[in-house]
Image: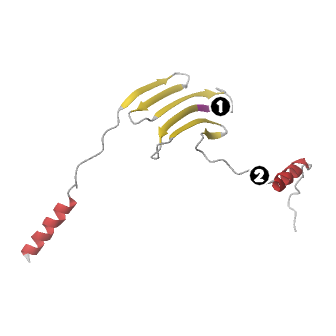
Amino acid sequence: MKYLIVALAFIAVTSAAPQGGDTTTPIPILRQEQEINPDGSYKYAYETGNGIIAEEEGHIENVGAENEGMVARGKYSYTSPEGELIEVIWEADENGFRPQGAHLPTPPPIPPEIQRALEYLASLPPTTETPNRRA
């Protein structure tokens, strides 16, 4: 029985040991720039050894106003596993994040019938809601 316990303990310890070493090669940073200004604006850029490039700059818009907010613009690129160059140019502000790139999907066109219905609805006068209306 002692031998069985020792054998099971030995198996548990050896199977819990790390299996092989780290085989990934570190990717070098070829270029890195960053600038942070007292007014809240910033800029950064970097490029890696495997072809990733990223740039971003931002600033505070409408400083001191009620609608003060951050605006940022940038771009990044990399090579997909299929070998295709992926490039994205983007902007982010009070309207959200808006990327642009040739690889991004586009929505299908609105069918003419639905477009006519939308135009008709937009041409109607605004309606007023009656509070506490019962059916």
Quarter that holds the N terminus: bottom left
Q: Identify the residue shown where x is 67% and y is 39%.
A: 95
Give residue 15's position: percent from left, percent from top.
Answer: 20, 62
User: How far apart are the alpha carbons under marks 1 and 2?
Assistant: 35 Å
Which numbered tag is attached to residue 68?
1
Q: Residue at x 61, y 31 (%)?
A: 71
Dominant SS of magenta comes to strand
Which residue is farthest bottom? 1
User: In which quadrant will I find the C terminus?
Assistant: bottom right
Q: Where is residue 79 in the image (x, y as percent from the top left)?
A: 47, 40
The residue at which mark 2 appears reads as: 110
Which residue is the extreme one toward the front?
Answer: 83
Three-letter amino acid code at the position of disc 2: Ile
Q: What stretch is highlighted in magenta?
A: 68-72
Q: Is 16 drawn above or below residue 72 in the view shown?
A: below
Q: Is mark 1 on a helix, strand or loop?
A: loop
Magenta-colored stretch includes residue 119:
no
Look at the picture and state if 76 lies above or below 11: above
Residue name at image x 91 percent, y 50 percent? 124
Nearest the eye: 118 or 72: 118
Query: Residue 7 appears in which quarter of the rendering?
Result: bottom left
- Residue 37 percent location from the top left of the image: 51, 22
**Which kind of residue does numbered mark 1 sit on?**
Glu
The colour style of the image is secondary structure
Q: Is residue 12 above or below residue 49?
A: below
